[in-house]
Amino acid sequence: MSAPFLLVSFNQERAARLLINYLNSQGIAAQYYVDKNDENNAEHGVQLLSEADKDVASHIASEFVQSPQDKKYQQAAWDSGETVRLSDKNSGISASGIWQQLHDIPFTTSVLLTCMIVYLLAMVGFFWPYKVLAIEPLTQLMENHQWWRLIGPALIHFSVLHIVFNLLWWWTLGGQIERLLGKTTLIILFLSSALLSNVGQLLVSGEHFGGLSGVVYALVGCVWWLGWLRPSWGLMMPKPLIGFLLVWLVVGYADILWVSMANTAHTVGLISGCAFAFILSRIVGKKSSISS
């Protein structure tokens, strides 16, 4: 019999046990594991008893991370004779439940709301946020020192389709990263990918562009590679979605769409996200080996 395989770990025991109950209800043998690195912090892991269940279990874990309050997880706990709640608040779709989700991922929420406010202000005729956030040539920035403009285009959108597409991906992938890896990790990824993708697009096509899509492609690259490099972290994207976004990237370069695409920002964002995932996996890997 093979040794237990670590699927994913959480900073709360309740979350681990809730996922374990659901996996067991789906016929996937899983058990609880705790790793106390120090007196204050402990990792509460979900171990699989058979590595053959890895792919299916990883998909379930990814769904759990995105919607941990789903009633089916609590139902599995009840069916197993255990009472395990992720929080003391109502897990249904309610004002308190929505507020709890927003509170759990504050940086993801802040960026989403900022993009929406900037867009809505423009829709009613207030374009000053666009003017304040728009990027400028590097020579001009060297003179006025308004360096926030290197990040600003990520918060600007020009159509309903543009903002809805970007914010849906940001909410899904950004929220997943913030829940599992923490707010600081997502902030660093956001700032670095926005900076690199915006500067790349500026150098190639000039300053007339905007959108969160460079950052979104960085999230895609990060989740994609971490799902491969560190599957036990529970981050993953279905392969068909990755394929769709890569095809969409190629289609943008073909220039056959009815809109102008910030292709350089997309490409630089994707590369920066993959590089970020690689560096992060190496840093955490070194820390783990040192502590062990």
Image (tube, helix red, strand yellow):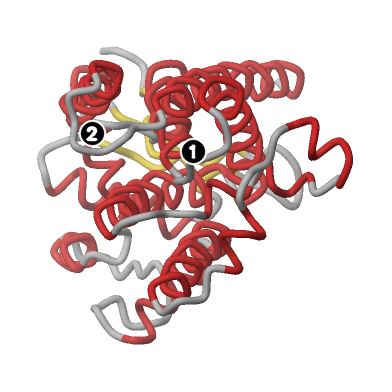
**Label ID, residue 215:** 1
Provide residue 189's location: percent of width, then percent of height.
60, 37
Left or right side of 43 for 101: left
Where does residue 84 sit, x and y in percent of width and height? Answer: 34, 67
Residue farthest to the bottom, as pictured? 95
Q: In percent of the image, x 48 and y 68: which residue is there? A: 113
The quadrant of the picture occupied by the C terminus is: top right
- What amino acid type is highlighted by mark number 1? Val
Residue 224 drawn above or below residue 157: above
Select label 2 or label 1 by which is in front.
1
Disc number for residue 139:
none
Outermost residue, top direction?
1
Measure how far apart labels 2 and 1 are at the Cα level: 28 Å
Q: Label 2: how many residues lie within 10 Å, few (<14), some (14-19) or many (20+)?
A: many
Asked where in the image residue 186 lies, by quadrant, the reply is top right
Residue 66 lies, with reference to residue 257, above or below; the image says: below
Q: Residue at x 45, y 46 (%)?
A: 211
Q: How many marks?
A: 2
Residue 100: image location, x then y, percent:
44, 75
Residue 120 vertical placement versus 180 (above, below):
below
Amino acid type, mark 2? Ala
Secondary structure type for disc 2 = helix
Q: Residue at x 15, y 26 (%)?
A: 240
Residue identifier under label 2: 57
- Graded by Cα atoms within 10 Å as few (under 14), some (14 to 19) or many (20 or more), the crowding at tag 1 reads many
Q: Is residue 74 left or right of residue 146?
A: left
Q: Mark 1 falls on what kind of element?
A: helix
Of residue 241 and residue 283, the one placed in the foreground of this image is 241
